[in-house]
């Protein structure tokens, strides 16, 4: 985990300088394991984000606070009761462990002054946020831990709070470099990075590997040369001074796509030139940037989980039905053989008699070759002929009906694919609610809104501005795609969409001006980024004037046709879209 104890040491010091003395204005709980405290001070309002999510536990100031649910949870109401209007007195870390205490001066129900603390434990899947009193009594926690989950340490209201078990590692702030070197010798059979990880408190695997990299090798401690030993002493001394003096460097490493890959409080050299370092003004800003896209995807996945399940079930059901229909259609292809048999029996019934199990007849459709036709001995030749005619007409009608059903099923699958793509890119609960309403109108979900319930005003399209100053609009859902392409767009506006790939409709608003090629290319990148091909390269995007777009009669939302168009190949990158 990059957010190790030393990183947290720098972050805690930064937060202490920034928000100590602030008053808690609001408390929100966007998700079951997330809290956001709105803090007001003389310098303005700041948002302190705290997460106990197993994949991204952390604490920092944020500019991208997640959307809050309509109704607060019981825990959120409890936290509001205790913390609203309290003063954030201090932020402290337990040694270099990943445990942070946020202390508050608060007032209880009868007006007495009390001290409360939010204990933030940043320990992967064991992360937690615990509200405790001054005497260490637990008021409540984001994650309650009972005896069935842990026999060693329980987190329940009314119990005394205890720190997580110590790992008995050395604190680089409280011991000398000589003591650290001596402790490393006790792990001489391990590689240097493993020995450092086992010896020093608050050091992540990333930093352990980096120290070994700076030493020039990751050999066992027992194989050290004098030169390597001296180099290690110098590195540990520099690290110790950096921690004591609080002069860490917020550094984010980005890959070739400019996506966040790793972060640290020092320069990282172990990846060579494959990653690009980017410096930030603060550790909070760094964490906000690193987790922004990851959190958006996680929240969208959680919020749309029920819809994704419904759409997945619908896809499986429609696919199964299509397979059966296609198999039945394939059987109906041979219906002409049924008609031929009926005609041959009918033409020769004067020479046939009842009671035969088959008829051997000359097939005048195939050079008078003899063909054996099965017959029902209980029926007359005329009745057997009519039986084959009935089977022929049934197969003929089946082809017409099945062709229509298969076409409808394929359209439903295409529509579901577009909805699933849109759901994967949602940013807010209202976007999900609008997609839910669309699915209800199309019959994929039962309507759950009560009669007379007030509906929210639809969200506007996502808006971008090209380098040439042209407005670019992107649909958030299929209903909005239709409205954007068929109502909002003017005849001279440009329409774009990924070629044969589910995605949003994109409009370049021309304002009766000629649209330059650079704007078309940027809009195409936006169209590719807002599609199922977001993570791909060399994505084909069709573009044409909006007046060339037509809506087929009875088509699903978002389905349009066009025949006159051009195609451009683009490589969508998030950093380009942000610019």
Image: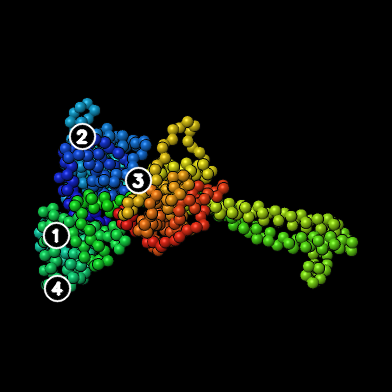
Indicate which label's residue lies in the foreground, 2 or 3: 2
Mark 4: secondary structure: loop
Mark 3: secondary structure: loop
In the rendered structure, which disc, 3 or 1, sits on the residue that comes first in sequence? 3
Question: Which quadrant of the figure contains the C terminus?
Answer: bottom left
Q: What number is the disc on residue 342?
A: none
| Residue 568 placement: quadrant | bottom left
Other residues around mark 2 within 10 Å, as few (<14) / some (14–19) / many (≥20):
many
Q: Mark 2 to mark 4: distance in Å? A: 57 Å
Give how far across and how far down residue 335 sits, in percent.
Answer: 72, 60
Q: Are the residues tagged 4 and 1 within 8 Å (C-beta)?
A: no
Q: Are the residues tagged 3 and 1 within 8 Å (C-beta)?
A: no
Find disc 2 in the rendering and name its residue.
86
Find disc 4 in the rendering and name its residue.
225
Find disc 1 in the rendering and name its residue.
239
| Closer to us: 188 or 271 | 271
Q: Residue at x 18, y 38 (%)?
A: 41
Indicate which label's residue lies in the foreground, 4 or 1: 1
Other residues around mark 3 within 10 Å, as few (<14) / some (14–19) / many (≥20):
few
| Closer to us: 277 or 52 | 277
């Amino acid at each position: 985990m990059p957010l190790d104890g030393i990183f947290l040491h720098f972050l805690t010091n930064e937060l202490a300088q920034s928000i100590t003395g602030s008053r808690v204005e609001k408390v929100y709980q966007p998700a079951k394991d997330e809290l956001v405290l709105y803090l007001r001070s003389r310098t303005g309002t700041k948002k302190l984000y705290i997460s106990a999510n197993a994949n991204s536990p952390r604490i920092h100031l944020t500019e991208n606070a997640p959307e809050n649910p309509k109704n607060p949870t019981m825990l959120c109401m409890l936290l509001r009761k205790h913390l609203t209007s309290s003063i954030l007195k201090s932020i402290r870390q337990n040694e270099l462990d990943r445990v942070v205490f946020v202390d508050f001066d608060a007032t209880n129900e009868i007006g007495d002054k009390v001290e409360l603390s939010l204990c933030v434990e940043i320990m992967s899947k064991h992360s937690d946020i615990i509200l405790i009193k001054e005497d260490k009594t637990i008021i409540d926690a984001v994650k309650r831990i009972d005896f069935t989950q842990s026999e060693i340490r329980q987190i329940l209201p009314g119990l005394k709070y205890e720190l997580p078990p110590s790992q008995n590692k050395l604190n680089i702030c409280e011991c000398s470099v000589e003591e650290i070197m001596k402790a490393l010798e006790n792990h001489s059979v391990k590689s240097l990075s493993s020995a450092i990880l086992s010896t020093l408190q608050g050091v992540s695997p990333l930093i352990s590997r980096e120290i070994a990299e700076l030493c020039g090798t990751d050999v066992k401690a027992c194989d050290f040369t004098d030169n390597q030993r001296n180099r290690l002493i110098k590195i540990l001394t520099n690290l110790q001074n950096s921690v004591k003096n609080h002069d860490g460097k917020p550094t984010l490493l980005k890959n070739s796509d400019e996506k966040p890959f790793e972060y640290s409080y020092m320069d990282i050299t172990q990846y060579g030139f494959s990653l690009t370092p980017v410096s930030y003004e603060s550790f909070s800003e760094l964490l906000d940037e690193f987790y922004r896209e990851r959190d958006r995807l996680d929240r969208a996945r959680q919020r749309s989980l029920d819809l994704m399940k419904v759409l997945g079930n619908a896809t499986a059901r429609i696919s199964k039905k299509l397979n059966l229909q296609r198999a039945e259609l394939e059987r109906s292809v041979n219906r002409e053989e049924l008609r031929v048999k009926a005609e041959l029996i009918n033409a020769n019934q004067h020479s046939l008699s009842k009671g035969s199990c088959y008829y051997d007849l000359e097939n005048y459709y195939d050079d008078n070759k003899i063909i054996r036709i099965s017959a029902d001995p209980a029926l007359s030749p005329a009745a057997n002929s009519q039986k084959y005619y009935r089977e022929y007409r049934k197969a003929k009608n089946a082809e017409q009906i099945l062709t229509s059903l298969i076409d409808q099923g394929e359209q439903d699958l295409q529509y579901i694919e577009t909805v699933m793509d849109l759901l994967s890119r949602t940013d807010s609960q209202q976007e999900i609610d609008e997609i839910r309403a669309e699915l209800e109108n199309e019959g994929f979900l039962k309507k759950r809104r009560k009669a007379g319930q007030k509906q929210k005003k639809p969200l506007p399209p996502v808006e971008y501005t090209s380098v040439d100053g042209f407005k670019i609009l992107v649909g958030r859902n299929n209903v909005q795609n239709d409205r954007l392409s068929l109502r909002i767009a003017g005849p001279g506006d440009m329409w774009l969409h990924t070629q044969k790939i589910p995605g949003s409709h994109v409009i370049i608003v021309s304002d009766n001006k000629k649209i330059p090629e650079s704007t078309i290319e940027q809009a195409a990148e936006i169209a590719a980024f807002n599609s199922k091909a977001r993570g791909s390269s060399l994505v084909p995007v069709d573009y044409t004037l909006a007046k060339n777009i037509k809506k087929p009669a009875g088509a699903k939302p978002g389905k349009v046709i066009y025949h006159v168009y051009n195609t451009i190949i683009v490589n969508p990158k998030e950093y380009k879209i942000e610019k």
